[in-house]
Image (cartoon, rainbow, N blue to C red):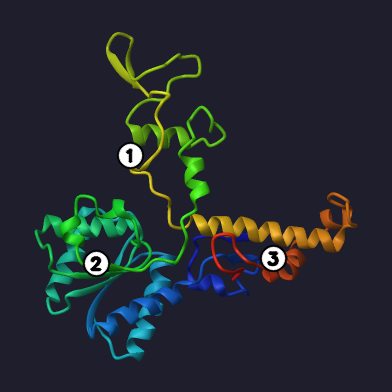
């Protein structure tokens, strides 16, 4: 099956002998690992600790960082890995390991967002604000929610993020969505209820204003007002990788259009030759050869 990913950055995915039908609109972790090493070297830090998430993202990123750090004579005090589904006890133990290497005040993180947040909360529990300087990958990036409640611990952190542009049309679309208009997305109702802390009423329930209804005489339900809309006041912020989703869709559309021009006669619709086209040929000769001036970036090509 052909895949065009907007977020998969693992370096092993570049191996075409294993992932022969995989393409992506983001660069592999090697590049941000180099950026993290550049940051460390720029500030003349030569003794750092490392923490990564278990799995493809953390493993590939940290491997690339270690390789480049050694080449630049940057020493590693300790290299910790956070296992899947780690609890608070494990995060506290990892923090204690970092504290034992007290001369390594700079900690490089290649963590998923949830792991980064839990590590910062462990630091807060230990009452060690301002003890470490955090250098983090795009798992932290620009995610403001990650530092909520641990702002003092996160202060001074340096994080990297893939360069992307905010897409105003996407914000306009999201800010006008409601559960009634977006029933095709089975998760949107849950997202709405979690964001506004209310219950989306059944289709046959007429709710014109904010109100609470009583069910079976003992359970109070606060129904969502139909006037609610997503905006910054309720924590809505465009995810930084939206542009790469758009790029992925455009890449596939351009590849399909180019294949149609080659296989079908002018003015025709989807012809038999296009329908019967081998998926491997489409990937090799069209998808991997896509290039266009992006609407939200200067240029684009599939990796």
Whole-percent x and y of residue 200?
42, 25
Q: Looking at the picture, tell me which residue is in the foreground, 283 or 52.
A: 283
Q: Quadrant of residue 80?
A: bottom left
Which residue is disc 1 drawn over? 234
Q: State the residue position of label 3.
A: 287
CA separation in Å, label 2 and label 1: 25 Å
Q: In the displayed structure, would residue 186 be above or below residue 15?
A: above
Cβ atoms at labels 1 and 3 below 8 Å apart:
no
Q: Nearer the viewer, mark 2 or mark 1?
A: 1
235 displayed left or right of 273:
left
For the residue carrying disc 3, how many other residues have a C-alpha within 10 Å: few (<14), some (14-19), or many (20+)?
many
- Quadrant in the picture for the N terminus: bottom right
- Mark 3 and mark 2 lie on one chain; the one further toward the N terminus is 2
Q: Secondary structure at mark 1?
A: helix
- Mark 1 or mark 3, whichever is nearer to me: 1
Residue matched to label 2 = 157
Work out whether residue 228 or residue 5 is closer to the camera in this orientation and state it. 228
> From this viewpoint, which residue is outermost toward the top?
217
Q: Is residue 245 above or below residue 214?
A: below
Residue 2 in sight: no
Earlier sequence position, callout 2 versus callout 1: 2
* Left or right: residue 278 compared with residue 18: right
Which residue ends up furthest to the left in the rendered image? 127
> Which residue is at the front of the view, 23 or 40?
40
Q: Residue at x 56, y 60 (%)?
A: 5
Horizontal and vertical percent for residue 44? 23, 86
Using the rendered view, name the quadrant where residue 31 is placed: bottom left
Q: The residue tagged with tag 2: helix, strand or loop?
A: loop
């Amino acid at each position: 099956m052909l895949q065009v990913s907007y977020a998969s950055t693992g370096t092993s995915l570049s191996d075409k002998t294993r992932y022969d039908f995989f393409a992506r609109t983001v660069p592999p972790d090697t590049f941000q690992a180099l950026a993290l090493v550049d940051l460390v070297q720029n500030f003349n830090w030569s003794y750092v600790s490392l923490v990564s998430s278990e799995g493809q993202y953390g493993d590939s990123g940290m491997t690339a960082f270690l390789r480049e750090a050694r080449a630049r004579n940057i020493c590693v005090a300790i290299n910790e890995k956070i296992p899947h589904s780690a609890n608070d006890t494990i995060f506290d133990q990892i923090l204690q390991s970092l504290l034992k290497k007290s001369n390594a005040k700079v900690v490089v993180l290649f963590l998923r967002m949830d792991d980064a947040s839990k590590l910062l909360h462990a630091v807060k529990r230990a009452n060690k604000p301002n003890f470490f300087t955090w250098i983090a990958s795009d798992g932290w990036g620009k995610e403001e929610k990650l530092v909520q409640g641990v702002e003092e611990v996160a202060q001074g952190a340096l994080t990297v993020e893939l360069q992307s542009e905010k897409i105003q049309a996407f914000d306009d679309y999201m800010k006008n969505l409601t559960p009634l208009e977006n029933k095709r997305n089975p998760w949107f109702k849950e997202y709405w209820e979690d964001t506004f802390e209310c219950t989306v009423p059944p289709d046959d329930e007429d709710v014109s204003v904010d109100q609470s209804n009583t069910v079976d005489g003992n359970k109070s339900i606060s129904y969502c007002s139909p006037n609610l809309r997503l905006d910054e006041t309720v924590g809505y912020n465009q995810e930084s990788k939206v542009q790469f989703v758009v790029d992925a869709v455009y890449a596939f559309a351009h590849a399909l259009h180019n294949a149609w021009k080659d296989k079908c006669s002018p003015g025709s619709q989807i012809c038999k030759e296009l329908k019967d086209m081998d998926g491997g040929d489409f990937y090799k000769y069209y998808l991997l050869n896509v290039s266009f001036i992006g609407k939200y970036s200067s240029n684009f090509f599939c990796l």
